[in-house]
Structure formats: C-alpha cells, structure tokens
Image: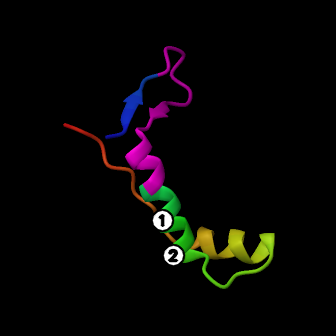
Amino acid sequence: MARIIENEEGKRRIIRMTSDDVINIVREYQKHVKYRSSYDEIRNQLEDCIIFIPEDI
C-alpha cells in the first residue's frame, strides 16, 4: 500500500508506492483515457477524473 512521507520543510509530501499501487494507477489511467489520441485530449479527460491511492492505516 502507498505510504505518505512527510517533508520536513512542510512543503510537498512524498508518496511511496508499491508495484501493486502503480499497476492500479496505470489500470485506472488506461480506463479513463481509452480512445483518446492526443496529449491535450488525455489531459482534459484526466482533469475531470479522480484517481485515489489507498494508504495503510
């Protein structure tokens, strides 16, 4: 599962992912951008979708 690593400076956090997390994200990406041909179409499609990364508690 994904693990969030806090940044000591308080800026951006780092998310450490397992190979299963990456595979799930790629699968979701492919599902959302199916039949899109250009970079702009893909960006526009992804702007409207939310992909969640699970975190162990």
Q: Residue at x 48, y 57 (%)?
A: 25
Where in the figure is residue 3, as x and y percent of width and height? Answer: 36, 33
In which quadrant is the C terminus drawn? Answer: top left
Q: Residue at x 40, y 48 (%)?
A: 21
Residue type beneath disc 2: Lys
Where in the figure is residue 48, as x and y percent of width and height? Answer: 56, 74
Instruction: Name which quarter of the figure residue 9 lies in.
Output: top right
Element assignment for label 1: helix
Q: Is residue 42 left or right of residue 49?
A: right
User: Label 1 belongs to which residue?
Assistant: 27
Dot label at residue 1: none
Q: Is residue 22 left or right of residue 41?
A: left
Instruction: Name which quarter of the figure residue 30 lies in.
Output: bottom right
User: Label 2 belongs to which residue?
Assistant: 31
Asked whether residue 10 is drawn in magenta, I would say: yes
Label 1 crowd bin: few (<14), some (14–19), many (20+), radius 10 Å: few
- Which stretch appears magenta? 7-23
Along the viewing direction, whichever of 14 and 33 lies nearer the viewer:
33
Judged from this view, the residue extending furthest toward the left is: 57
The reply to whether dot 1 and dot 2 touch (C-beta < 8 Å) is yes
Element assignment for label 2: helix
Q: Residue at x 43, y 38 (%)?
A: 17
Residue type beneath disc 1: Arg
